[in-house]
Image (cartoon, rainbow, N blue to C red):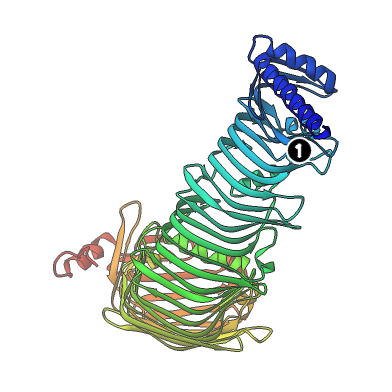
Amino acid sequence: MLKKVFVITSVIIVCVSSLLIVSMFFLLQSPYSGKIVNVILDQFSPYTIKVQQAAYSPPYQLTLTDVDITDDNQDLHIPKLSLWASSSLWKDNKLSFDSILIEEANLTLSALNSPLLQSFNTQQLALQNVDIQAPNWSARDVNLQIQKPEWLSPKQTVPYGKVQLSAQQLYVYGEALDKLLIDAQYQAQDSTIYGASFKWRGADVSGQAEQYPQGWSLINVTVNKLKLSKALPVEKLFNGFQALALPVYHINSLDILNSDISYGNWNLNQIDASLENFFINQALKQQEQASLSFNAESIDYEQLRLISPTARLNMSNSAISLDEFDADFKQGRIQMSGSLTQKQVDLNSLKVSGVKWLEDTTQLVVILDEASSFLDTLTIKTLEVKNSQLIQVEQRPYWQISGINIEGKDLQLIQNGKPSLYSGSVEASANNASLDNLLTIQAIVKLTAQNENISIERAFLPLARGYIKANGQWQKRELSAPWQLSLNIDGFPVDLPLLQEKLPFQVIGMAEADINLEGLSGDYPIFAHSLTGSANLHLHQAALRVQNDDKTTYQREWPLNTIKIAIDRGRIQITAKGEKAQLAGNIDLAKYQFGTLIFTSEAECKRLWSDILSQTNIVQEVCSPESNRQAVSSVEGPPSNDL
């Protein structure tokens, strides 16, 4: 009998429950569904919640339309809210849901921190086609799923959990990340991004990241077809990460492919680069074991261009190891390897072949000057230059060197920020070289240096009809840095524009000279007070010609014999005599403006007086008119104006 009563009672309870569920189902399908839900929410919720319409789908889904939620902090409108009730409606003193879905809403980021959402137990919080606004960023058309969402702090905006996110666009600090996809485990610490991808400035970006106490480390990130102009510094990208609470401190592996990047005065065109184990907040000298390798279609620095450059570098122990650098440059090729620090460059090898610097050669001087300005030390173990060319035609004097070949060993070229040859040996040759109309072929120069004492072992410059030979020493290690130079010259053409500009008259012919000089190096006063030596100069097959502004002319064969120059501690005495001609002068290099150098010559009833330093000529008639006619008639034929 008791068993029968129990069965009957159970059947009645089931029937009543079913009747209530069926009644609720039909009521929620009626036009009064919204009012019914509002009445229920008023009884059980501490918040003001208004629903326009509700629909119930057995067994557990409740869909609410046009939901307005008001609490003390904000008003929230949700066009569509779907709730999937849990099999156990009540858990841990909270209403329990399997899933909550918010659709087509415009939310502020703080809405995800709503006390209403935190008042439920839910296995999944989802957003679909939602726009989100935050102080430093915004997202459009967001689809989000958070498994087992968890708020551990009242200040926590986004709940922790397993996150899957897609967005049509994420806008951060003026930069748009399009077609964003993220699969991540978001935790209070040690979060992980298993995979992320988006489009940025036309580039495809993908990769993974891991969170550490110091920040985020980028794991196997690839950036393809990036276009980065000077208008956007590279640092701005990392500022964007920090705006998203993703401060990046370390790059485990970053590959940049098929990209064009402009930074400062540099333009990297179609570059492929790989950066590994790089700490962003540390200077290069603080890197532990970072490495960088790259190749590019071209790299531009101001007006210079490297074609097809490749390089491989390792950064550790305050130094950069340049394992390889190879590039085409100005129709030639440059290869080097070595190590670099902030103020020091030590190259194991530098090879230059076929380089033709044919314009704006002064830029080379600027580059070398800039290099010496920020380097304390430059050494090159092996230097090799083959078949290269330099031409300077922008300003006078014009010059060119072709077929340059250089071999250097154990060179130290900068020390304490000052360029020179401090140690090592270097031998240079050129197929041909010219300065204005002075031409040399197969010239060769050999220098050696040891303990800052530089020696010209050999210097021989063949000329068209002669040569220049030189030897000398420069003892830089000594306090006064004494130097000595000997020159032997034969067949030197004196009609060079550089020389003619310093003379008040025109001279043609060939010069022979033996020159021996010595002195102390330093500034000009030291040079001027220490220069000592002698020179003997002789011109042969030579002639001179003067034409003044008043059209008076004077010309004759070169009249002087050997010009003797004696120098004693900067005081120069010049003497020479010849047939009706004389050259005499005294110059003190310390008082150059008071020097004199006078040349006089007489021929064919005319006398020439020249002040060479002031470039002044006076031509005088020294014969009477009758004797002048006799002198002219004694000359066979008219005088030639050609020199």
Looking at the rendering, which quadrant does residue 105 occupy? top right
The amino acid on which the numbered mark 1 sits, given as a three-letter code, is Thr
Residue 69 position in % (x across, y down): 76, 20
Residue projecting furthest to the front: 1
Which class describes the residues within 10 Å of circle 1: few (<14), some (14-19), or many (20+)?
Answer: some
Quadrant holding the C terminus = bottom left
Looking at the rendering, which quadrant does residue 603 occupy? bottom left
Which residue occupies 45% across, 60% down?
A: 362
Which residue occupies 49% across, 56% down?
A: 256
Q: In the structure shown, which secondary structural element does the residue marked by tag 1 occupy?
A: loop
Question: As displayed, is residue 129 above or below residue 148?
Answer: above
- Residue, disc 1: 157
Quadrant holding the N terminus = top right
Question: As displayed, is residue 104 above or below residue 125?
Answer: above
Residue 613 in the figure: left or right of residue 131:
left
Residue 486 visible somewhere in the drawing = no
Question: As displayed, is residue 606 above or below residue 143?
Answer: below
Question: As displayed, is residue 188 above or below residue 442?
Answer: above
Q: Nearer the viewer, residue 193 or 353?
A: 193
Residue 126 position in % (x across, y down): 65, 35
Q: Nearer the viewer, residue 609 or 411?
A: 411
Residue 57 in the figure: left or right of residue 72:
left
